Image (cartoon, rainbow, N blue to C red):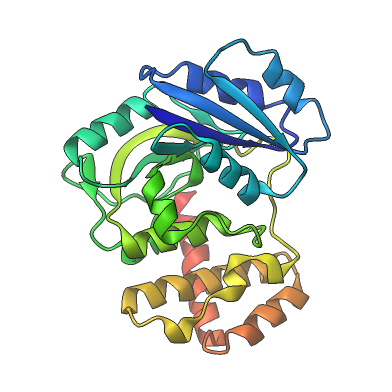
């Protein structure tokens, strides 16, 4: 049995369809834990109007998405935790695909399917011989494609005891922070089957953070990373954020981040920016 954890904050327009996408699953053995993180709209009322005894609504004062997810983990009755954001959708086969993955690799503790964007944007994916496989080099592959995303992961509760839960001090990149800790300690089983949709148009989406000191990227210690592929992964991440700040003309955070990571010189930044622009041009 699986516990589905859904953090909820001001998603009254989206949450009903999100919950319905769980109730539509062909795999039926689950509970749904919805943690209302101090919503100021009618999100909680929408949930209360859905009649299904597998749904539990928990309310707490606003503490952020990490605290809401951690609350869901704590309150879960089951060993396996699946996450779904309050504005995204699962396809009917999501949990069934995860069940197949667990059958192929029954001794692992982290499983991840694949997702699509609602605006049909193109994303890079490695071609692989089998649809279900173990990721051989997480950091090398994650530098090229989006391997993990909150709404497509299934994690055994034991993992949280070993690596910790979501960092409540971070308001952006808290998911990446957890993926990194998991990748350093566990094998990750991946399916190339698309089972979820990231709804780009949903309300209350997080934008580029102005509070750099509360983002994961600000606390990466490149000097402590010995693995070549892992260090390259983080350098690309930092260069990407510099590119985003430059593009949005946020020169204050651009300078602050550049000062934080002097090894990301302008040659690296320009190289990344050029590669990013070329990729974007080729997709058109």
- Residue placed farthest to the top in the image? 51
Q: Is residue 190 above or below residue 224?
A: above
In the rendered image, residue 253, in percent from the top left (x then y), is placed at 72, 74
In the rendered image, residue 14, in percent from the top left (x then y), is placed at 67, 27
Q: Is residue 112 above or below residue 241?
A: above
Q: Viewer-proximal residue, 97 or 236?
A: 97
Q: Is residue 15 above or below residue 135?
A: above
Image quarter of residue 47: top right
Residue at horizontal 70 percent and vertical 71 percent from the top = 213
Regarding residue 118, the answer to whether it shows in the image is no
Image quarter of residue 166: bottom right
Side (left or right) of 34 relative to 249: left
In the rendered image, residue 245, in percent from the top left (x then y), is placed at 68, 69
Side (left or right) of 32 relative to 99: right
Image quarter of residue 240: bottom right
Q: Viewer-proximal residue, 131 or 268?
A: 131
In the rendered image, residue 85, in percent from the top left (x then y), is placed at 58, 37
Q: Viewer-proximal residue, 81 or 21?
A: 81
Residue at horizontal 69 percent and vertical 44 percent from the top = 205
């Amino acid at each position: 049995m699986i516990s589905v954890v859904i953090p909820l904050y001001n998603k009254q327009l989206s949450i009903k369809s999100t919950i319905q996408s769980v109730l539509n699953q062909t795999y039926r053995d689950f509970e749904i834990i919805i943690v209302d993180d101090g919503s100021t709209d009618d999100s909680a009322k929408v949930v209360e109007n859905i009649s299904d005894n597998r749904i539990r609504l928990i309310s707490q004062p606003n503490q952020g998405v990490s605290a809401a997810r951690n609350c869901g983990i704590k309150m879960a009755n089951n060993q396996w935790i699946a996450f779904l954001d309050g504005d995204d959708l699962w396809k009917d086969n999501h949990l069934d695909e995860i069940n197949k993955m667990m059958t192929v690799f029954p001794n692992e503790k982290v499983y991840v399917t694949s997702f699509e964007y609602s605006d049909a944007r193109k994303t890079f994916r490695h071609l692989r011989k089998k649809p279900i496989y173990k990721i051989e080099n997480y950091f090398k592959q994650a530098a090229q494609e989006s391997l993990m995303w909150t709404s497509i992961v299934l994690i055994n509760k034991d993992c949280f005891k070993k690596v910790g839960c979501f960092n409540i001090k971070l308001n952006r990149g808290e998911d990446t922070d957890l993926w990194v800790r998991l990748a350093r300690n566990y094998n990750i089983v991946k399916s190339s089957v698309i089972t979820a949709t990231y709804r780009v148009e949903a309300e209350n989406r997080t934008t580029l953070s102005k509070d750099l000191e509360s983002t994961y990227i600000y606390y990466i210690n490149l000097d402590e990373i010995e693995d070549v592929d892992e260090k390259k992964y983080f350098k690309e991440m930092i260069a990407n954020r510099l590119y985003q700040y430059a593009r949005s003309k946020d020169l204050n955070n651009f300078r602050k981040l550049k000062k934080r990571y002097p090894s990301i010189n302008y040659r690296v930044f320009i190289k990344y920016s050029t590669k990013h622009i070329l990729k974007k041009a080729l997709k058109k």
